[in-house]
Amino acid sequence: MFDNSPYVPYVVVWLITAKCNLNCGHCYAKQFLRINELNLREKLRLADEIGELGVSWVAISGGEPLISSDTFPVIKRLRDYGVGVSISTNATIVNDTIAKELSKLDVYVYVSIDGPINVHDKIRGLGTFSRVIRFINTLKKWDVKFGTVMAVGKYNYKYVKDYLEIAKNIGANSISIIPIMPSKRLVTKKYSISSKEYIEAIKAAEEFANENRLLVSLWCTPFAPLITKSNYIGYYSCRIYDIIDIDPSGRLLACDVTGIPVAETRGKTLAKAIIEYQNNPFIRNIVNPPNLPEKCLKCELFDYCRGGCFARALAEKGDPNAGDPLCPLISNLREDFC
């Protein structure tokens, strides 16, 4: 895995811009607002190299990617190579032209919904929920496939079932939940969820998923099987080395939440940047962690989870291999809640 030949990640998560039309308190992308964003020529070159490398999927994020005039040219270039593309959006820009283009390019759309109207508007801004629903109706008009994502934190974790009911009723093709992530921006910590609160949210999702026979994906929750054995709950681990994050300036990151740059693409090819990335000591340390808590080493999920979310551990404990703070084993809650 670690040599002088670039490995090919299955997914590239590309924060194409940090700019946004909203001002959500829990947003971690604001840390990239002061960096020098790639220009369109540079973005198209990077898209070419992603396609030539053979990456299967690019998840475009932000900020709000739909406010950037560069987003659709980049998507078109990626689709020319047969790369699958998804886009994450706050869904506040209602526009038939945008929806038509998303349909034409066969882009999968992830829409942020953080609860019922009063909760979503408190988090995202007054009137945003209604704009989201209008956006979704426009997507459906143009046969654009879409999923919903709830960022779960202290202010909305008790509304998980309300969110899931909304996602079901609007006909979402996929339904996902992600815990709000602590980041360099200290303000995000007041929105972050505790282990006890997140377990409560997962239990609510499990109950809804089982009752309705709907798959609910838990993003950034590799320890999920310690809490639920439901066949309707999905999860994944970022430590299995099949995803690379790229920030608006083209830097390869250890994680988009941490913002830790590992390699530059400016001035070199993506392939060379990936070689630097895969041989970086920090990346080696999180993919094959040399030191983890005893609870992790003895856990049945060790080979897959590998200590859970290193970004949370780094933010809250100062050590990426201190164990995921949301994990019920690490937080000593497994016997009480699982």
Image: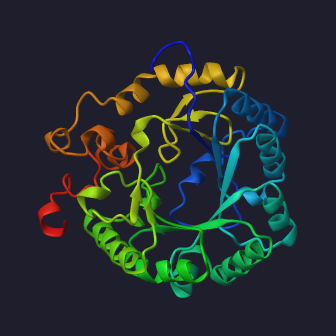
Instruction: Reply above or below: 49 against 268.
Output: below
Residue 328 visible, this angle: yes
Residue 123 locus on image (x, y percent): 54, 75
| 38 and 216: which is toward the camera | 216
Q: Please give left or right for residue 308 compared with residue 298 in the image.
A: right
Residue visible at 33% across and 39% down in the picture: 320
Q: Quadrant of residue 139?
A: bottom right
Q: Please give left or right for residue 137 compared with residue 314 in the image.
A: right
Instruction: Reply above or below: 293 against 5.
Output: below
Q: In which quarter of the image is residue 78?
A: top right
Residue visible at 52% across and 84% down in the picture: 116
Residue 326 visible, this angle: no
Residue 294 locus on image (x, y percent): 14, 39
| 205 and 14: which is toward the camera | 205
Q: In which quarter of the image is the N terminus?
A: top left
Q: Quadrant of the C terminus?
A: bottom left
Residue 336 locus on image (x, y percent): 13, 68
Instruction: Reply above or below: 319 against 283.
Output: below
Total number of numbered discs in the rendering? 0
Residue 237 locus on image (x, y percent): 40, 46
Spot the residue most to the right: 97
Q: Please give left or right for residue 83 compared with residue 196 in the image.
A: right
Q: In which quarter of the image is residue 53?
A: top right
Residue visible at 26% across and 55% down in the picture: 327
Residue visible at 58% across and 24% down in the picture: 274
Spot the residue most to the left: 335
Spot the residue most to the bottom: 118
